[in-house]
Amino acid sequence: MALIDLIMPKLGESITEATILKWLKQPGDTIKLDETLLEIATDKVDSEVPSTAEGIIHEILFSVNDVVPVGKVIARIKTTADDTIKTFSPVVSQKKLHVPSQQNKESIIEIAPPKSTVAIGRFYSPLVLNIAASEAISMSELENIPGTGNEGRVTKKDILQYVNNREQVTAQELTIIKEVETPVISSSQITTYSGNVEIIEMDRMRKLIADHMVRSKHTSPHVTSFTEADVSNMVLWREKVKKEFEKREGTKITFTPLFIEAVVKCIKKFPLMNCSLDGNKIIIKKDINIGMATALQSGNLIVPVIKNADQLNLVGLAKQVNTLADNARNGKLKPDDTNNGTFTITNVGSFGSLMGTPIINQPQVAILAVGVIKKRPVVVETPHGDSIAIRHMMYLSMSYDHRIVDGSLGATFLTAVAKELENFNGERDY
């Protein structure tokens, strides 16, 4: 008999750990090659981990809700082969990693340090957040716990040790903590709710979204600019070609790839919109990876990413948009599908909204919201005089990080996107 070590697979370039959600097999159960053994979750997406061998589950080394580093042995499978121990990593997502050349690496711009700095929230695993909630530990108190995990993250061991030692904190230290932390209401204090109410517990994904949004507002000083665009040429062109496009290309042409195409052109003119901030360094991204906010059937939101969008033509963008949207709604996204976005677009118009004030998708510096397209009477200027005409109009709004993007750049970029949409060539091919 041989024992096969199953390790936590690599789930993406920036992901170093995953939370175990559910074991589908138990010790003593038989399992086939490539049969799903467990379900895991990262801060980006849920995934299924297949078995790398056929045999009997000999040992499971971690429990549900445990946070496991990438590369750690999580289970052992007994096979009928020779009596040795082998280690295999299951393939959750197979994708070649592109190593940029020296010329293509991200640009780094040094900026002067600010007069004062504000602590920026770290990522916390669902398990750590659950322990913090059960022990009535506030977010500000959690921020002060030293982390021994990757990049200083707080691990399960760190927070349990903090809970055990909390009773030994001196009266003076308690006073300091109380001065900076947000008041916490213990779960034991919340016993009744007045009125006719229904209490719904947040699911895991909604908790992650909530934490991500709060950290974004704490991290970036948000500014939102607004403009409008006459997209009549684009609307009429799509109406004219959509049937032939679907027949010829095997996929539908929606407005989203047209929006992405316009944004990509403008990012090339204003590369500072495609960056992130690391301390006092501005990291300008040479790759243009556009995230598109997608609503799930559960009501939650996820942002799949179109990698190297500037290298795709309109047909390629349309196919990527439709494939990622379908996979998101059907729970088939791979971990790498939500990684490394550099700019995000959210279509609030798909739900009938005129405009929105979106929250930046960290660590990006801007997010564009496109509103519903509506027919309105507008003044049309011509060389022969002004006239009133019925046009297809749309509002655009963009939230940006005021630490990096000033109002002049934000407004100029947004106006450029609007002009790109207005100047759409109604006689173009795909």
Image (cartoon, rainbow, N blue to C red):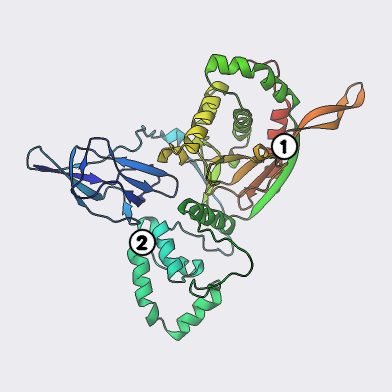
Mark 2 or mark 1: whose residue is earlier in sequence: 2
Of all residues, the one furthest to the front in this rendering is: 196
Q: Which residue is pictured at 52% across the width and 53% down the height?
A: 212
Residue situated furthest right in the rendering: 385
Q: Quadrant of residue 268?
A: top right
Is 36 situated left or right of 420 in this image? left
The reply to whether residue 279 is in sight is no
Residue under the point 41% across and 33% down: 101
Q: Identity of the amino acid at label 1?
A: Thr
Residue 364, given in percent of the width and then of the height, sits at: 55, 46
The residue where tag 2 is placed is 155
The residue labelled by disc 1 is 415
Residue farthest to the bottom, as pictured: 171
Residue occupying image coordinates x 52% and y 75%: 189
Q: Would you say residue 346 is visible in this rendering?
A: yes
For this rendering, which residue is in front, 170 or 116?
A: 170
The amino acid marked with disc number 2 is Thr
Which is closer to the viewer, label 2 or label 1?
Answer: 2
The residue closer to the viewer here, 243 or 360, is: 243
Q: Nearer the viewer, residue 318 or 109?
A: 318
Position of residue 104 measured from the top left corner of the image (x, y, whole percent): 46, 34
State left or right for residue 335 relative to residue 28: right
- Name the side, left or right, on which 327 lies relative to 403: left
Q: Secondary structure at mark 2?
A: loop
Q: Mark 1 Cα within 10 Å, few/some/many (few <14, many 20+)?
A: some
**x and y percentages locating residue 46 in the rendered image:** 41, 45
Marks 2 and 1, Cα distance to the nearest angstrom? 45 Å
Give the label on residue 41, or none.
none
Where is the C terminus found, in terms of image quarters? Answer: top right
Which quadrant is home to the N terminus?
top left
Q: Position of residue 323 (x, y in %)?
A: 49, 29
